[in-house]
Image (cartoon, rainbow, N blue to C red):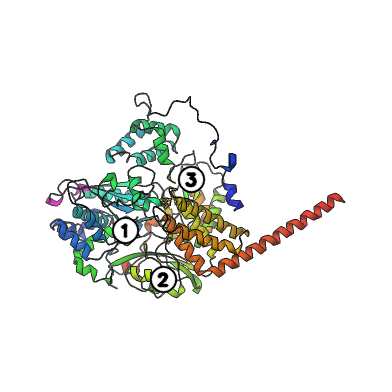
Amino acid sequence: MADAQRHVARFTNDSRIPGWDRAADLTKEPAVVPDAATTEVPAELRAAIEDAVRRFPVGDSAFIPALYAVQEQYGWCSPEGIEQAASVLGRTPAALTAVATFYDMFRMEPLGRKTVYVCTNISCSLCGADELLEALEAELGEAPDVHIRGFECLGACDIAPMASVNGIYVGPIGLDQVPELARQIVAGDDPLPAKQLIKRPCADPKVAEK
Amino acid sequence: MTDTLLFKGIDEPGLNTIDVYLARGGYEQLGRALKMEREDLITELSGSGLRGRGGAGFPMGKKASFIPKGDMQKYVVCNADESEPGTFKDRELIQKNPHQLIEGLIIAAYAIDATINYIYIRGEYDQQADILDASIAEARERGFLGEKILGSDFSVQLELSRGAGAYICGEETGLLDSLEGKRGNPRLKPPFPANEGLFNGPTLINNVETLSAIPSIIKLGAEGYAAIGVKDSSGTKLVSISGNVERPGNYEIELGTSSRELIYDLAGGPVDGRAIKCWFPGGSSTPVLTADDLDVGYDYDSIAAAGSMLGSGAIIVVDETQSVVELAYKLAKFYAHESCGKCTPCREGTRWTVHMVERIKDGTATPMDLDIMAAVQEQIIGHCLCVLGDAMAMPIGSLIAKFRDEFEAEIEDNRNERERKLAEEFAAAEVEIEGISA
Ligand SMILES: Cc1cc2nc3c(=O)[nH]c(=O)nc-3n(C[C@H](O)[C@H](O)[C@H](O)COP(=O)(O)O)c2cc1C
Ligand code: SF4
Ligand code: FES
């Protein structure tokens, strides 16, 4: 228990919410939809968001693809990017931020662009995922532009323990392969080509019989 | 067993491209379905006995029959969120045979007269989503999607929507909110999506595997399909077997096959001849069964009679060397992380369960904690908006009920260990104090 509490920052009166005890700044203007005429939006970002609106025309259903576009542009859902997306979508930045914070794949801080998710859910942890995460984290150390984190079941428990390297699933990863994988991640190379899920045949022997 | 249906020749190179799929007779069943009256098609789907493969096992045809008739905009939404721990069958279907899914989805859309349709895929399935995107484009190019398809007067659109990492978006109403661009909080039911779903229109939501089975049903006919499997569990099912087994993977089985056969014959059982401590029959959200239940038939009703659920068809095998406390810890942490926070019993119950298991681990728990933990699980079940809370409470409750001795032993051991350490520290501290005073 002590351990868990150490992970959670506590503020006044043991609250988990920073600044809850400070009064709202009533002099501040309420958030508005950024002015589309004066907000500068990079051309690629605008094109990506407009494409999303074409495919998802109803209500706010273009929000998630728009946030992906922001993340692609800036490496994270930066306030600047959200402001720009909001101006194209004609909504307030807060509306977009509220959606972004719900989802694990949106980065709300400037973390590395090379994203590594190591699954630490049940099936993978039964096969040594916690050790894998620890070893890979240690091997990567402070490698620049790399963001590694444990993740919930990635839907690839057949290759446990596994990781998703920029969306490419690899596994089962032996601890002896950790240095090689770490090197590939840092260099931006294809991760463990022989271990990629996409190349794996179906386990069911009935499939191969035909 | 009978021939494979869903996995038939699934490793054929290029099957994800439309030419190979067409060469195998692909989209022929769509042509046949479009010639049927909608009523007859729904009767056919009901007659097949196909039950939902996403978790709840609700009869697919019956759900389709709930969709109201009329001119309003209707939708089919395919649930490809696949985030139930242990489940990875939809991934293989999408990656290797996406057109089978698209064909099944268009048939379902025709049956309920849905002209706008979506597939919602989890954001982590990046490679699979790219494949599916390309397949949808191909289907559009060849006129299986679009205006008045195959000379009928049915016009149909399909879009792929990518999630962004949230288990709760697999729950059907959480999924709808996410698809509408909101936080994925589940909705209060009723109204059910069949009446008021996506953008308030009637919506049929089905899992990838459910929709992928439809072309086979049209091909074999309702009776032919219903003849496979056992009573009230017709057809074939993909099972994802993982955890402590020799050969983890997806296997297509006839429903009703013995669980022992799946775990031992297909997946090879635990390594080094270890014994099975427990297994989840339908994903991490289902109550665990033990080695005593291995002869239960793998079908909806038999697994239910054994006290669990077939769920998504994901069998997770846990061998005798694993600790149930660690297992409970992983489970609780997952559901606490994924709780959307809307209902108190789920949000707080999952969080407190994590704390209680942590107490067991660090040696501060007493045997009474186990009763409190079990009581917390009971207070979650049935008291939440969706079943995510129950999805933690049921397996954890079953672990406590079935492995109470082990929990108690670990509580004792960890307490003794902690007390030993404290005594040591205390002794060391005293020496120092003596040193200072001396
Ligand atoms: C917390 C939670 C998560 C779920 N996750 C999924 C999922 O990832 N995929 C899925 O198909 N169904 C999932 N379901 C079940 C869906 O709510 C729904 O029952 C299903 O998609 C209906 O399709 P089917 O009738 O074809 O099974 C989940 C349910 C809950 C409560
Ligand atoms: S049960 Fe949990 S996940 Fe479901 S709506 Fe309530 S808080 Fe959200
Ligand atoms: S538990 Fe790791 S991918 Fe499923």
Q: Identify the subunit bearing mark 3.
A: A
A113 vs B79, left or right, is right
Numbered badge on residue B93? 1
Numbered badge on residue A51? none
Badge 2 density bin: few <14, some 14–19, many ≥20, Cα 10 Å: many
Magenta stretch in the rendered image: B140-157
Of circles 2 and 1, the one toward us is 2
Q: CA distance from mark 1 to mark 3?
A: 32 Å
Q: Quadrant of the N terminus of chain B?
A: bottom left
- Name the foreground residue: B398 vs A60: B398
B198 vs B313, left or right, is left
Three-letter residue code for mark 3:
Ala
Three-letter residue code for mark 1:
Leu
Residue B316 lies in the magenta-colored region: no
Three-letter residue code for mark 2:
Ile
B407 vs A124, left or right, is right
Q: CA distance from mark 2 to mark 1?
A: 21 Å
**Label 2 near label 3: C-beta < 8 Å?**
no
Of circles 1 and 3, the one toward us is 1
Main secondary structure along the magenta-highlighted residues: loop
User: Residue at 45% across / 66% down in the picture?
Assistant: B288
Q: Do the residues at pointers 2 and 1 share their chain?
A: yes
Q: Identify the subunit bearing mark 1.
A: B
Q: Which residue is mark 2?
A: B263
Residue B155 lies in the magenta-colored region: yes
User: Residue at 20% across / 53% down in the picture?
Assistant: B112
Q: Do the residues at pointers 3 and 2 share their chain?
A: no
The answer to which of marks 2 and 1 sits earlier in the sequence is 1
- Name the foreground residue: B7 vs B403: B403
**Residue B73: quarter of image:** top left
Q: Which residue is mark 3?
A: A187
